[in-house]
Image: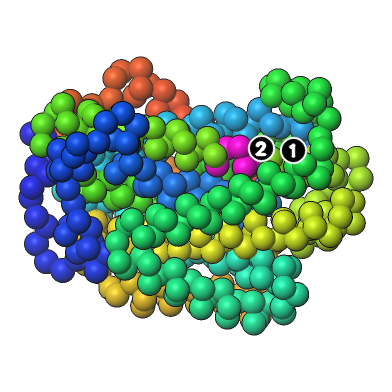
Amino acid sequence: MQLVEGDALAGSVTQLNEVESVHSQSFKSAIGKAKGWRQLVPFIGPAFIAAVAYIDPGNYATNIQAGSQFGYMLLWVVVISNLMAILIQMLSAKIGIATSHNLPEIVRQEWPKSVTIFYWLQGEVMVMATDLAEFIGAALGFHLVFGLPMIPAAILTAICAMVILAFQVRGFRPLEMVIASMVFIVVIAFSTEILFAMPAFKPLMNGFVPKFQGTDSILLAAGILGATVMPHAIYMHSGLTCRRVIGQTPEERKKIFRFEQVDILIAMIIAGIINMIMLAVAGSTFFGKEVISDLTVAFHGFGTYIMPGAALLFGIGLLSAGLSSSSVGTLAGDIMMQGFIHRSIPVFLRRICTMLPPLIIIISGINATKALVMSQVILSFGIALAIIPLVIFTSKKRIMGALVNHRLTTATAWGVAAVVICLNVFLLYQTFAG
């Protein structure tokens, strides 16, 4: 039997979910009398929040190192990574649309209680690891752009995070507007930066031809691919679509999913272009000169090899990406806790709890870039746990109804899952034993 979208979950829910329930719309009321492209407007937004996970400070570090060490050679890996991410995010959005429940809720309904408690616990660890990378990235952005010491930069980051949270508790639409604005700041920063870097056209195009150059390039490609799918983005996207616009019939749900596919394609293509530009700018600026594995070194390198304005743009992009992605981690944790164990805590308290580990790291003086790398290692453990139930549930007609995966979609999704999981296992092995 398909999960019934009208089933109200008893018990306490978060303030955000209460706002969401109030503003849920039927498909007909959402569309209204709109014609043509205007029908898309109510469905644009969720994918932009999810896409922030693909342009976070961890991606910055990987792309900058790939470009500085191998030039444009691994651009094709970024493209493949983006295609994989599009498929996974479409499955996540689809399960929310088909069932009017998010993925954690479905795990709780379908699997034993002990499993869901385990999922909740590991989910909280994943959220803290996510916030570690993104909070440190934002603090590093304040440090680089404004010259603030890291501790005051961290305090300022915490204040900004609380301000963004004030938009979040009012519902998804205000948060989506803030996040989308920050994403476009990143777009503008790197679009301008590539004009300064001016990569050569022919070598740039050659970067889209699949090839490797030694073991190091394979390892770095595995890092790019393995870090593509973030666990919290999978859980979160289903939560953003599950009760936003509710389809009453299979036909309406199919139409909602078609509109959401457009949202996903726009947001993920933008995220993919940003990642490609990052790598291309690093390749044009640093390749053959020095290998960059530290974001602070990258910032000063852009100022040295191009101009101070290029370093400033890099810092602004890092700051905007860090602040936007950090706020998204809190939302994901809220969705996971409510879904897995049907409990909640005030979102401001959750935000404070997730900010404590990065604040402690910054105050203790640990290298920020090394902390970013370790956070990605921790996240590797949660990727399989997020992808496997997603593919299993979207392949079941009993759950998905008319939106159940086609066999080819399921086969492709299992293939992507296998690649991502194997690469993350490989990266974990290299980290601890390589």
Instruction: Look at the picture and state if 418 lies above or below 211.
Output: below
- The amino acid sitting under disc 2 is Met
**Towards the viewer: 228 or 303:** 303
Judge from the rendering whether residue 101 lies leftward or rightward of residue 413; answer left or right: left
> Bounds of the magenta span?
271-276
In which quadrant will I find the N terminus?
Answer: top left
Q: Position of residue 374 (x, y in %)?
A: 61, 59
Residue 254 on image: x %, y %: 22, 28
Q: Are marks 2 and 1 in contact (CB under 8 Å)?
A: yes
Asked if the magenta segment contains residue 414, the reply would be no
Q: Position of residue 108 (x, y in %)?
A: 20, 51
Q: Nearer the viewer, residue 178 or 79?
A: 178
- Give the quarter of the image for residue 13: bottom left
Name the residue located 57 percent from the left edge and 57 percent from the top edge. 321
Task: Tell me the chief SS of the magenta region.
Answer: helix
Q: Which residue corresponds to the image point at 36% horizontal and 78% vertical from the top-left?
A: 349
Can you identify the residue that label 2 sits on? 276
Element at badge 1? helix
Residue bearing mark 1: 280
Q: Is residue 315 above or below residue 47?
A: below
Check disc 2: other Cα within 10 Å, few if <14, some if 14-19, many if 20+. many
Q: Which amino acid is tagged 1?
A: Ala
Specify the color scheme. rainbow
Point 32% across, 36% down: residue: 38
Q: Residue at x 38, y 47 (%)?
A: 45
